[in-house]
Amino acid sequence: MRATMFRSISPFCFVIIAVSCLSIAADEKPAATQPAAGEVTDGCQISVSISPAECAVGEPIILTINFTNLGPPVKLRGIGPVADYDIIVLRASGARAPYTVYGESGRDPKQALGIYGTVLDCGASDMVRVHLNRCFDMSFSTEYRIHVERKMPSRPDPEKMVTIVSNTVTAKLAEPNLADPEDTKKAE
C-alpha cells in the first residue's frame, strides 16, 4: 500500500518541483541571449561557444565546436577543425575576417597531420577547440560574429550534400591597455 501511494504522489511532487524551478529561473536574467545550438539538420546539430567573449585585441580566444548526432550513427571524417568546418568570422562591418598564414595552413590537406574518422552514435558528440584569433585576423577592436558550417552527405541520399549550421556567438575585442604598470603605480 505504501509503495502504491508513493507512486501516485511522486508525479505530483515532480510537477511541483518543476514549476518551482521554472519560477526561480524566470526571475533570473538570462546569461546569454544567443541560441545554444544551431538547428537540427539531417539529424545533426552544431553548437559553438567562445571564451572569453570580451577581451583585448591579441588575447587568446578559444572557439569550442560541438558536433552532436541526434539520429542514426553517422561517420565523421576529417583532417582538422579549420579544414573540416567552414568557420565564419564576421567583423561589425559585415566583412569576413581573413585567415592568417597559420589558419590558411590549417586548411591545407597537404599539411595535415593525418586523416581521422569516428562514428557517432545517437546522442554522441565530437568536440574540437580552435585558437580563433591565431587562425583569423582579429586585430581590429570591434565586435565579431562567429558561426561554423559543415557539409556532409545526406543520410537519405548520400549523393547530395547537406550543410549543418551552428548558432552564432559574439566576441567583443577592445584596444589593449598599453600603459606601463610602473606609470600606474606612480600616479597612485
Image (cartoon, rainbow, N blue to C red):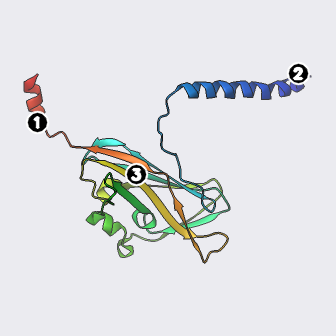
* Helix, strand or loop under label 3: strand
Quarter of the image that includes the C terminus: top left
In the image, taking residue 155 as reference, residue 89 lies left or right, namely left
Identity of the residue furthest to the front in this view? 93
The disc, 2 or 3, on the residue closer to the chain's N-terminal end is 2
* Helix, strand or loop under label 1: loop
Relative to 57, residue 86 above or below: below
Which residue is denoted by mark 1 in the rendering? 180
The type of residue carrying mark 1 is Asp
Q: Nearer the viewer, mark 1 or mark 2?
A: 1
Q: Are marks 3 and 1 in contact (CB under 8 Å)?
A: no
The type of residue carrying mark 3 is Leu
* Helix, strand or loop under label 2: helix
The disc, 1 or 2, on the residue closer to the chain's N-terminal end is 2
> Which residue sits at x=11%, y=36%?
180
Residue placed most toward the observer, 50 or 116: 50
Which residue is denoted by mark 2 in the rendering? 2
> Which residue sits at x=68%, y=62%?
72
Which residue is denoted by mark 3 in the rendering? 63
Relative to 182, residue 156 above or below: below
The disc, 3 or 1, on the residue closer to the chain's N-terminal end is 3
Relative to 141, residue 1 above or below: above
> Which residue sits at x=58%, y=24%?
24
Neighbours of disc 3 within 10 Å: few (<14), some (14-19), many (20+)? many
The type of residue carrying mark 2 is Arg
Q: Quadrant of residue 103?
A: bottom left
